[in-house]
């Protein structure tokens, strides 16, 4: 139980740190890329909460969705870096956090 709550807290902290990056995306890209990043972050928070409450196959299904969405988020964060919407230092910080969360999700799935 504590592990799942730690995943939630880590991802919540990631979202808090990442929102300023989303807000700095130029207006012409914010409507699509920025909005999708926001929705993906919120969706992941909700999935983590739901998976924490579920048991059995429902939990496994939700954990798989969490893992898949984290992979998508990693790619979109990389795209944001490549489009120069964030610095390489910011990218490294956010990717490091996402990788840590991904490892925690993987352990949660195997547990």
Image: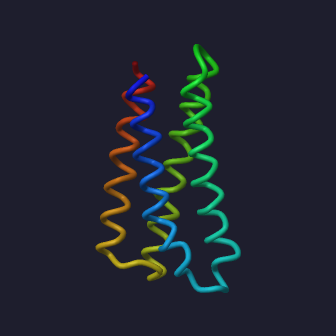
Q: Position of residue 9 (x, y in %)?
A: 43, 43
Q: Residue at x 64, y 77 (%)?
A: 30
Q: Position of residue 84 (x, y in %)?
A: 44, 82
Please state which of residues 95 and 42 is positioned toward the viewer in this rendering: 42
Q: The N terminus lies in which quarter of the figure? A: top left
For this rendering, which residue is in front, 6 or 73? 6
- The quadrant of the rendering that contains the C terminus is top left
| Residue lying furthest right | 31
**Residue 22 location, x and y as percent?**
54, 72
Q: Residue at x 62, y 31 (%)?
A: 50
Query: What residue lies at 35% left-to-right and 53% top-to-bottom?
Result: 97
Question: Image point 42% across, 53% down: which residue?
Answer: 13
| Position in image of residue 102 (x %, y %) | 40, 42
The colour scheme is rainbow
Corner quadrant of residue 86: bottom left
- Count all numbered tags in the image, as a single digit: 0
- Residue 92: name its quadrant: bottom left
- Would residue 72 appear left or right of 6 to someone viewing this image? right
Residue 88 in the image: above or below residue 73: below
């Amino acid at each position: 139980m504590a592990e799942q709550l730690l995943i939630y807290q880590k991802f919540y902290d990631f979202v808090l740190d990442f929102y300023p990056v989303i807000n700095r995306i130029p207006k012409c890209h914010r409507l699509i890329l920025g909005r999708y990043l926001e929705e993906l972050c919120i969706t992941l928070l909700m999935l983590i909460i739901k998976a924490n409450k579920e048991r059995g196959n429902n939990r496994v299904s939700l954990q798989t969705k969490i893992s898949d969405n984290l992979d998508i988020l990693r790619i979109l964060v990389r795209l944001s870096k490549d489009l120069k919407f964030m610095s390489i230092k910011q990218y490294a910080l956010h990717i490091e956090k996402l990788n840590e969360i991904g490892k925690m999700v993987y352990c949660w799935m195997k547990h």
